[in-house]
Amino acid sequence: MPLHEIRPGRAVAGLVMLTLAGGYAADALGAWDAPWRFFVPVLVGGLWLAATVTWVNYRLRRRRQARRASAEGIGAQGPRGGATRVT
């Protein structure tokens, strides 16, 4: 099985969407009388949380990649995108 990168931000976004779908389904079935104003903050907050998780994951992957390249003596991109010189 080929290895692939784990994308936790997408998982968070998917869970938020499933929560919203469940809330809409419960409201449509009459099991829960939720005001429409409830869903907007959940959507915006969930997307913000997914973006934050994606950003943190990106920064950690870049740091790990730079450390690995530095340990192997290969020039890697620095934190601002430029190449670093390994001496």
Image: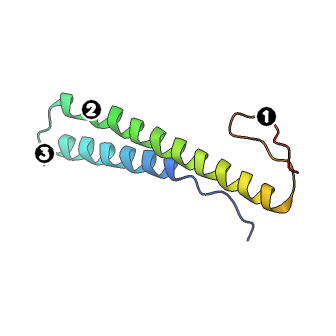
- Residue 22, image x, y percentages: 28, 48
Q: Secondary structure at mark 2?
A: helix
Query: Where is mark 3, residue-wise?
Result: 32
Q: Is residue 60 left or right of residue 51?
A: right
Residue at 81% across, 42% down: 84
- Residue 23, image x, y percentages: 24, 44
Q: Residues within 10 Å of mark 2 (few under 14, many from 20)?
A: few
Residue at 31% across, 42% down: 20
- The Cα atoms of the two marked residues, 1 and 3, are separated by 53 Å
Q: Is residue 72 above or below residue 56?
A: below
Query: Where is mark 1, residue-wise?
Result: 82
The structure's colour scheme is: rainbow
First in sequence: mark 1 vs mark 2: 2
Labels 1, 2: front one? 1
- Residue 6, image x, y percentages: 60, 57
Query: Where is mark 2, residue-wise?
Result: 41
Residue at 85% across, 49% down: 86
Q: Residues within 10 Å of mark 3 (few under 14, many from 20)?
A: few
Q: Secondary structure at mark 3?
A: loop
